[in-house]
Amino acid sequence: MQIRFTERADKDYAKLPADVRKAFQKQIGFLLANLQHPSLRAKKYDEANDIWQGRVNRNWRFYFAVRGNEYVILSIIPHPK
């Protein structure tokens, strides 16, 4: 599998605090190795549009889609509590 960022995800990533960026990079490694890695807590967020949610850390989430052999990162945002 490969990772591809949308334009929005690129902008979100550029704005992340350094500690969140580092945590996100670690989580992407887990995603590439195993979608079911416990740290990701990956789950379907929007079944109709095939959008998944993954955990960056306690306060941040990222949203992605699985398209062929790619994980398409859609956005990285603070957790909507």
Image (spheres, helix red, strand yellow):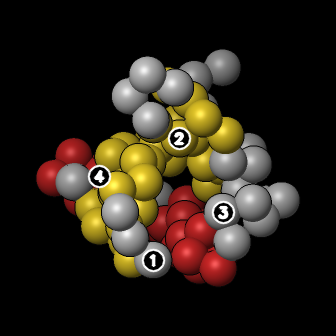
**Which percent across, then down, holds residue 12?**
31, 50
- Closer to viewer: mark 2 or mark 4: 2
At numbered mark 1, what does the secondary structure look like: helix, strand or loop?
Answer: loop
- Circles 1 and 4, Cβ within 8 Å, touching? The answer is no
The alpha-carbon separation of the residues under discs 3 and 2 comes to 10 Å
**Mark 4 — residue?**
9
At numbered mark 2, what does the secondary structure look like: helix, strand or loop?
Answer: strand
Disc number placed over residue 35 in the picture, else none: 3
Please tell me how crowded label 2 is: few (under 14), some (14-19), or many (20+) other residues with Cα within 10 Å. Answer: some
Q: Earlier in the sequence, mark 3 or mark 2?
A: 3
- Circles 1 and 3, Cβ within 8 Å, touching? The answer is no
**Mark 1 — residue?**
1
Please tell me how crowded label 3 is: few (under 14), some (14-19), or many (20+) other residues with Cα within 10 Å. Answer: some
**Which percent across, then down, holds residue 44?**
60, 35
Residue type at mark 2: give it: Trp
Please tell me how crowded label 4 is: few (under 14), some (14-19), or many (20+) other residues with Cα within 10 Å. Answer: many
Disc number placed over residue 52 in the picture, else none: 2
Q: Quadrant of residue 79?
A: top right
- Closer to viewer: mark 2 or mark 1: 1
- Count of numbered badges drawn on the protein: 4
The alpha-carbon separation of the residues under discs 3 and 4 comes to 19 Å
The alpha-carbon separation of the residues under discs 2 and 4 comes to 14 Å
Residue type at mark 4: give it: Ala
At numbered mark 4, what does the secondary structure look like: helix, strand or loop?
Answer: helix
**Which percent across, then down, holds residue 40?**
71, 56
- Circles 2 and 1, Cβ within 8 Å, touching? The answer is no
The alpha-carbon separation of the residues under discs 1 and 3 comes to 10 Å
Report the residue at 27% width, 61% height from top.
Answer: 5
Q: Earlier in the sequence, mark 2 or mark 1?
A: 1
- Closer to viewer: mark 1 or mark 4: 1
Quadrant housing the C terminus: top right
